[in-house]
Image (cartoon, grey):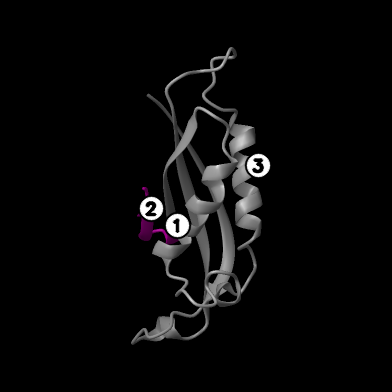
Amino acid sequence: MYELRVQSHFSAAHALRQYAGDCERLHGHNWAVEVRLAARELDRRGLAMDFREVKALLGEVLETLDHRFLNEVEPFRVDNPSTERIARYIYDALAPRLPAGVTLAEVTAWETPGCGASYRP
């Protein structure tokens, strides 16, 4: 199995509902995102997938979050925009965009350098 890792970032604000602490108030983060893709085979070029293609697809997904108030982005109008749910959102948006033979193994979102959450099915 081959594994690719691509990192990117986005900036956004959120407010955690029903949270007893500072994070219940509006605040922002510069999120770092890492995606891990898996493939059993390489193409004729010897690539599982071109990094540029992965970055472009991930960029399309992150554009829906970047410089936004996440509580106003679906599904976060109802679901709390926690880092865990943000990782799942990115996973669910990116996975169907990948070509046949490449699967999304995991998405990790870091709200600060020391605090992150991952989602994998």
- Position of the N terminus, as image quadrant, is top left
Residue 47: x and y, percent? 54, 20
Q: Marks 1 and 2, how far apart in space? A: 6 Å
* Mark 2: amino acid: Tyr
State the SS at label 3.
Answer: helix
Q: Residue at x 50, y 27 (%)?
A: 101
Going from N to C along the chain, the mark reached first, 3 or 2, is 3
Given residues 21 and 36, the one toward you in this image is: 36
| Position above or below: 85 against 39 | below
Q: Which residues are magenta?
A: 110-121
Q: Residue at x 60, y 28 (%)?
A: 50
Q: Which amino acid is tagged 1? A: Ala
Q: Residues within 10 Å of mark 2 (few under 14, many from 20)?
A: many
Q: Please tell me which of labels 1 and 2 falls first in the chain.
A: 1
The reply to whether callout 1 and callout 2 are in contact (CB within 8 Å) is yes
Is 59 one of the magenta-colored residues? no
Q: Which residue is mark 3?
A: 56
Give the residue at mark 1: 87
Q: Which mark is residue 71?
A: none
Q: Along the polypeptide, which appears first: circle 1 or circle 3? A: 3
Neighbour tally class for label 1: few under 14, some 14-19, many 20 plus, Cα within 10 Å: many
The residue pinned by badge 2 equals: 119
The amino acid type found where label 3 is placed reads Ala
Side of 5 where 12 appears, left or right: right
